[in-house]
């Protein structure tokens, strides 16, 4: 089942080397059903199944809480409430404000009240329904407007300032001002949240958790159980998708499973069905943004003010960092010259919104792209030209609102190359002709850039560890702190290790991420997975390699530096030795064949009070041109074609990178078009299943989708093999489709008013925007 | 009558005894057989992670269909072959669908992959077309959150170039086993629930069905289980006595007569698709977008009617087409216009002992103009916000006959009586259409829900009437071009 050898093992190179399109390490397991996810792990005969009972009230005090009927129900082994927690009733990542189980009060509809462990899930669920719970209801804050009115701030952030935005705006020749709504997004990972805990001796517990963050799971479980962290092991081989939704939230389910296992002495499992998963877990933050961008008469930005407001839900979770990242991306790829960026993070009585691919960055970028379209409209110019005029460029036009200099920008080259390759100018003219000839259907086209900062903005998280063993047969065991959620991280890190030892990749055993192998790791998030874990794994490999070189130099009478690892062989003192033979000889010579590796990202620092520093090690870039058509009678819409040019530095694995680019783009497209989260006035989520929440299907992929990796890509910083992170940035390529939809709406108003489209651009929203634009056109 | 479910899996007969017959195929696979390759993603037949293939004997050969194992009850397998993702490879040799997915980097997190493999497996075994539209239709019921679908579509295209996999197990033996099981009568499976003993009946003939219907007046009737399955998997309801209609072969037919189409109530949409598309391309397009391949393989036209949903996609089309229903009981049959069947939300003109037997859809009148539109947030595999069908006959520039029906605009699928009255006899002109559009708000008071607001529904309904008019004039008015029917 190997790929053709010239793809994954070209002549003279090892199989699976860095830069080759190596298939995902689990591809064959995926297609045969052999890949095990948390719910697939073989169960024990005394297995318990856990159902978590939820509040059906958004905000209120619990007035009645009678669980006696639950305890008496058939098959029930344990009922767990806040009173059963020996440690701290909190699974939050930072703020201490996420109770496992409600205590006296509820903060959102869907909040866990208690857990039932029974012989079967059906019994647990049936028992939970017998609880007698009543509430003194309070009026919930559901929307951003509710929270604004109530002054419900969750976190206060200092404004970010560059120059003097007020003065610049006062004298600007042209203003693009407006207000936009940007919807949230459910992760809709195909595998729901799951955790499976096995009790060990002496109160220890081993937990299989579908998580991007095993270390945090371990720490939370220890805190909940009131035991040292060394009593808890969290392990994860793979997730069925994460996208940020398994960064902090799995701790809740892992902790409940662990608590049950420790309390009952029996293995216990939580697997959420889709509805519970969508109701109980947070989403991408929805935003409202008010903007005023001042331009000179040529369309060059003089200054900009952005006022971001977001719905964070009932607790802090990662909302501070997410909203920070929105502020960091208000400029997208443009020099603002003078800027003031304000961020309001509202507490609402809804589920706590959380990390989602892009982490606030996508929401941050929308306003400036809208302003570009509006300025172009006002000046009668092609928006592409306005964008090019404002792109970060020369030394005197490269300072971001947070003080970091943009020194690696290739956005302009990417955009101009893409415009050429995708025939942007000619197609824009053709679309004008089409629009003149068609009353009902209108088309639009837009080319937008992406500049995305790479690094955790919380500086201490930018560290990683790895562990490598070589056994005496020359087989290699690889472990690191990164987690596999489908993004191909394990494959990339194995390629890096294969390259270092110059052995075929199939000699390397990829192992489950586990807190007892590599400790104190960061979440696999912020697109950092291969950057930091790849470096840590390489460091571990180099440590062992140096020992082997030293051993070979002594054995074969040459200098250590002259020992060369090449294509499964080692060259030393004129001898050519099989890698496995050298390893075995080294073992007999009592050379350690195991090492850890460690990495921390250099150069980064940030002062949150001043909102200045260098939060990002480097930037990743991309550009996309999308062509759309809308139906002005129904608002139905379709992306007809998209062309993408994306920068991944020097690719570690082009096949994996293409997969991230296309998958990210399509996920962004869903966020901006069909995926709509609806709450009712009482704070109940109405879209909690795929029947009501619509992620893209196969036919939503544009019929023409051309994706290219930037050929000249090379990270200027000293990253792993000069590659760049690719997990998040491509999601924002889809903003081009949103902008193109706006162009089509503008065309529907006969170019007499510029569209004010909100996201997601559902048929209903497009019809609304057409009507609103036509009203303004009639008044103009 | 048989009291155990028998089906073929990997060349052997599996006998499921004493299993709650409302256990889904997915639950049985994962919990009883511990075959965990098939995944649960939604338990409502929407995401496709649970897709398996069902093989049925047709003319001495096995014909495969993809279904959602998460909502189909175990007894549905009786007399059939079940194929899961674990069944496909042998001795390390992958099925072409699997090999192509590996070669094209078609899996990332891998959780949806088994479902995609099974949908592709069916396409491969059928020798189905591998153009983009055919693949998108075949895969509309499989959601992937990682890849963006491109590599999966590539795999669908390239698998047809790969040689057939060595037989998983002797096909002749499977056919022999299926022939043996198929000889058996219908099922009567006893099961206990809350201290009571109930039966799950799966009769094979119409007579047997009518007898059972008369005997168990409060039984739950199950056709394709694409709705009733969710009562169990989503609402966790206990069903009591169940009469499954999906084995009643007398109710599975599509007949073209001189007057029109006669379709047996238990005909899955997949089997009626071609005839309905020939009746009118817009009907074909609405059926193409109804659920997914998996849902259309299970879901029946009669089940769709009988459950009385206000948003059953084909109802407005059938009503605008002048369809009539035949209802039958042990006492005899009666025919009614389809629109009269829907009395109110959750209330249909169906007596305790009756079943929906067949539907009759007359040919369009000569010179009739028919148009149908489905509006939803997503084109494929979405439930409509509203659905509209128009049937105009124009004589000498005047509207001589008109039927207009909508779904999603009221508590039932409904004709727009005032709108029709405004058009009847009127000049075929934009002015008449505007007059008719203006009275739609007297015909309907739509609701606001998560699919659309009341305002949007009303505006879109008026605009669809305008669109139907403009399309007759030859205007280009669809962002989604209707797709030719690729399979029957």
Image: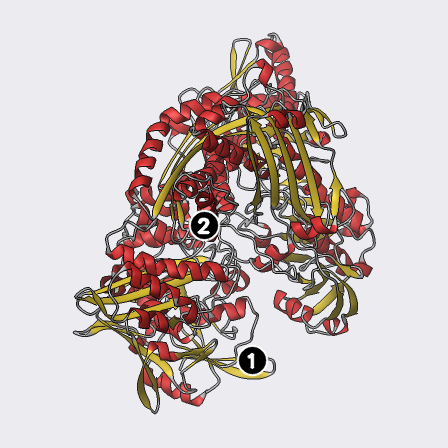
Of the pair B21 and A324, the residue shown nearer to us = A324
Q: Chain of mark 1?
A: B
What residue is shown with label 2?
A771
Please provide percent x and percent y for residue A681: 63, 60
Please report the residue visible at 55 percent of the width from the left and 66 percent of the height from the top: B234
Image quarter hosting the N terminus of chain A: top left
Quarter of the image holding residue A436?
top left
Please report the residue visible at 50 percent of the width from the left and 67 percent of the height from the top: B230
Of the pair B435 and B82, the residue shown nearer to us = B435
Please provide percent x and percent y for residue B347: 46, 79
Residue B198 relative to residue A86: left or right: left
Q: Chain of mark 2?
A: A
Q: Residues within 10 Å of mark 2 (few under 14, many from 20)?
A: some
Q: Nearer the viewer, mark 2 or mark 1?
A: 2
Of the pair B75 and A395, the residue shown nearer to us = A395
Please report the residue visible at 81 percent of the width from the left and 44 percent of the height from the top: A228
Q: Residues within 10 Å of mark 1 (few under 14, many from 20)?
A: some
Q: Which mark is residue B192?
A: 1
Please provide percent x and percent y for residue B46: 46, 58
Q: Is residue A200 visible?
A: yes
- Is residue A342 depicted above or below B325 in this figure? above
- The secondary structure type at the circle numbered 2 is helix
Q: Which mark is residue A91?
A: none
Q: Is residue A474 visible?
A: no
Residue A623 relative to residue A467: left or right: left
């Amino acid at each position: 089942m190997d790929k053709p050898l010239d793809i994954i093992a070209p002549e003279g190179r090892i199989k699976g080397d860095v830069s080759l399109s190596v298939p995902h390490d689990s591809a064959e397991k995926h297609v045969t059903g052999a890949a095990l996810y948390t719910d697939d792990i073989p169960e024990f005969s005394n297995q318990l199944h856990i159902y978590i009972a939820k509040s059906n009230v958004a905000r209120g005090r619990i007035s009645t809480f009678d669980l006696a009927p639950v305890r008496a129900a058939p098959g029930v082994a344990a009922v767990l409430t806040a009173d059963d927690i020996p440690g701290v009733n909190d699974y939050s990542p930072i703020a201490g404000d996420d109770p496992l189980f409600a205590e006296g009060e509820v903060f959102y509809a869907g909040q866990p009240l208690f857990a039932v462990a029974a012989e079967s899930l059906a019994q647990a669920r049936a028992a939970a329904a017998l609880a007698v719970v009543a509430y003194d209801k309070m009026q919930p804050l559901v929307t951003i407007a509710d929270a604004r009115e109530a002054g419900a701030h969750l976190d206060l952030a200092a404004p970010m300032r560059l120059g003097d935005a007020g003065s610049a705006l006062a004298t600007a020749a042209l203003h693009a001002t407006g207000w936009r709504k940007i919807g949230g997004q459910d992760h809709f990972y195909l595998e729901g949240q799951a955790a499976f805990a096995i009790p060990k001796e002496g109160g220890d517990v081993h937990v299989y958790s579908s998580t991007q963050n095993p270390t945090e799971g371990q720490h939370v479980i220890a805190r909940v159980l009131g035991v040292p962290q060394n009593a808890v092991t969290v392990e994860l081989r793979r997730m069925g998708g994460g996208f940020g939704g398994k960064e902090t939230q799995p701790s809740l389910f892992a902790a409940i499973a662990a608590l049950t296992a420790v309390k009952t002495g029996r293995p216990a499992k939580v697997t959420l069905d889709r509805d519970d998963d969508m109701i109980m877990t947070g989403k991408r933050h929805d935003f409202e943004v008010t903007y005023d961008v001042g331009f000179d008469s040529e369309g060059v930005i003089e200054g900009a003010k952005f006022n971001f407001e977001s719905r964070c839900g009932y607790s802090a979770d990662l909302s501070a960092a997410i909203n920070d990242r929105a502020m960091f991306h208000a400029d997208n790829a443009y020099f603002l010259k003078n800027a003031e960026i304000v961020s309001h993070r509202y507490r609402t009585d809804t589920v706590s919104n959380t990390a989602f691919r892009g982490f606030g960055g996508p929401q941050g970028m929308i306003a400036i792209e809208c302003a570009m379209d509006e300025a172009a409209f006002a000046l009668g110019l092609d928006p592409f030209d306005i964008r090019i005029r404002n792109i970060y460029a020369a030394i005197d036009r490269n300072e971001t609102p947070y003080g970091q200099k943009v020194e690696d920008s290739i956005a302009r080259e990417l955009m101009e190359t893409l415009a050429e390759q995708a025939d942007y100018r000619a197609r824009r003219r053709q679309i004008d002709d089409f629009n003149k000839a068609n009353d009902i259907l209108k088309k639009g086209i837009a080319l937008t850039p992406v500049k995305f900062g790479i690094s955790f903005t919380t500086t201490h998280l930018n560290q990683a560890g790895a562990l490598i063993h070589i056994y005496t047969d020359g087989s290699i065991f690889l472990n690191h702190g990164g987690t596999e959620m489908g993004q191909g991280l394990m494959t990339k890190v194995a390629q890096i290790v294969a390259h270092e030892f110059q052995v075929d990749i199939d000699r390397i055993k990829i192992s489950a991420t586990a807190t007892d192998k590599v400790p104190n790791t960061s979440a696999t998030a912020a697109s950092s997975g291969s950057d930091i874990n790849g470096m840590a794994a390489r460091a571990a490999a180099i440590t062992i390699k140096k020992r082997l070189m030293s051993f070979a130099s002594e054995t074969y009478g040459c200098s250590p530096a002259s020992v060369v690892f090449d294509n499964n062989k080692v060259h030393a003192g004129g001898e050519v030795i099989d890698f496995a033979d050298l390893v075995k000889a080294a073992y007999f010579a009592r050379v350690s064949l195991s090492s850890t590796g460690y990495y921390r990202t250099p150069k980064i620092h940030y002062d949150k009070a001043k909102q200045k520093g260098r939060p990002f090690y480097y930037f990743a870039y991309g550009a996309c041109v999308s062509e759309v058509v809308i139906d002005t009678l129904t608002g139905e819409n379709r992306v007809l074609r998209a062309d993408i040019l994306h920068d991944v530095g020097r690719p570690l694995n082009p096949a994996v990178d293409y997969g991230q680019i296309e998958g990210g783009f399509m996920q962004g497209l869903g966020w901006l078009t069909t995926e709509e989260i609806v709450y009712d006035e009482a704070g109940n989520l109405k879209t909690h299943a795929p029947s009501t929440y619509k992620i893209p299907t196969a036919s939503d992929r544009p019929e023409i989708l051309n994706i290219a990796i930037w050929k000249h890509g090379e990270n200027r910083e000293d990253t792993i093999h000069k590659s760049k992170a690719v997990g998040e940035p491509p999601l924002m390529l889809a903003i081009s489709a949103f902008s193109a939809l706006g162009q089509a709406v503008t065309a529907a108003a006969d170019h007499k008013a510029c569209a004010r489209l909100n996201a997601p651009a559902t048929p209903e929203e497009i019809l609304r925007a057409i009507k609103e634009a036509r009203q303004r056109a009639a008044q103009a | 009558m048989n009291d155990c479910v028998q089906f073929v899996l990997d060349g052997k007969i599996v006998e499921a005894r004493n299993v709650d017959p409302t256990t889904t195929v997915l639950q049985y696979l994962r919990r009883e057989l511990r075959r965990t390759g098939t995944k649960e993603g939604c338990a409502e037949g929407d995401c496709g992670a649970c897709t398996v293939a069902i093989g049925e004997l047709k003319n001495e050969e096995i014909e495969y269909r993809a279904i959602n194992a998460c909502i189909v009850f175990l007894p549905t397998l009786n007399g059939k072959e079940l194929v899961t993702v674990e069944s496909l490879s042998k001795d390390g040799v992958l099925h072409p669908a699997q090999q192509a997915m590996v070669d094209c980097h078609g899996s990332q997190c891998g959780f949806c992959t088994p479902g995609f493999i099974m949908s592709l497996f069916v396409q491969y075994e059928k020798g189905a077309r591998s153009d983009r539209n055919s693949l998108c239709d075949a895969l509309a019921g499989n959601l992937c959150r990682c890849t963006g679908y491109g590599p999966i579509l590539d795999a669908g295209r390239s698998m047809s170039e790969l040689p057939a996999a060595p037989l998983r197990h002797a096909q002749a033996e499977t056919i022999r086993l299926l022939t043996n099981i198929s000889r058996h009568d219908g099922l009567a499976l006893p099961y206990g629930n809350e201290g009571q003993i109930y039966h799950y009946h799966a009769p094979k003939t119409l007579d047997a069905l009518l007898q059972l219907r008369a005997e168990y007046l409060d039984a739950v009737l199950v056709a394709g289980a694409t709705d009733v399955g969710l009562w169990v998997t989503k609402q966790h309801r206990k069903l009591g006595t169940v009469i499954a209609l999906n084995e009643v072969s007398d109710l599975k037919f599509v007949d073209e007569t001189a007057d029109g189409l006669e379709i047996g109530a238990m005909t899955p949409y997949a089997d009626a698709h071609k005839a309905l598309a020939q009746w009118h391309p817009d009907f074909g397009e609405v059926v193409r977008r109804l659920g997914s391949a998996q849902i259309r393989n299970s879901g029946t036209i009669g089940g769709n009617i009988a459950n009385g949903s206000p948003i059953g996609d084909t109802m407005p089309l059938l009503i605008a087409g002048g369809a009539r229903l035949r209802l039958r009981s042990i006492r005899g049959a009666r025919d009614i216009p389809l629109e009269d069947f829907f009395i109110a939300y959750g209330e249909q003109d169906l007596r305790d002992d009756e079943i929906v037997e067949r539907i009759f859809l007359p040919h369009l009148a000569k010179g009739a103009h028919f148009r149908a539109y489905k509006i939803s947030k997503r084109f494929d595999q979405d439930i409509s916000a509203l659905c509209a069908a128009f049937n105009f006959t124009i004589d000498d520039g005047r509207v001589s006959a008109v039927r207009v029906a909508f779904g999603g605009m009221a508590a039932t699928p409904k004709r727009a009586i005032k709108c029709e009255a405004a058009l009847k006899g009127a000049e075929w002109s934009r002015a008449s259409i505007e007059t008719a559009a203006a009275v739609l708000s007297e015909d309907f008071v739509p609701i606001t829900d998560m699919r659309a607001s009341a305002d949007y529904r009303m505006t879109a309904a008026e605009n669809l009437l305008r669109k139907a008019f403009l399309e007759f004039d030859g205007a280009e008015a669809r962002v989604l071009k209707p797709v030719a029917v690729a399979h029957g």
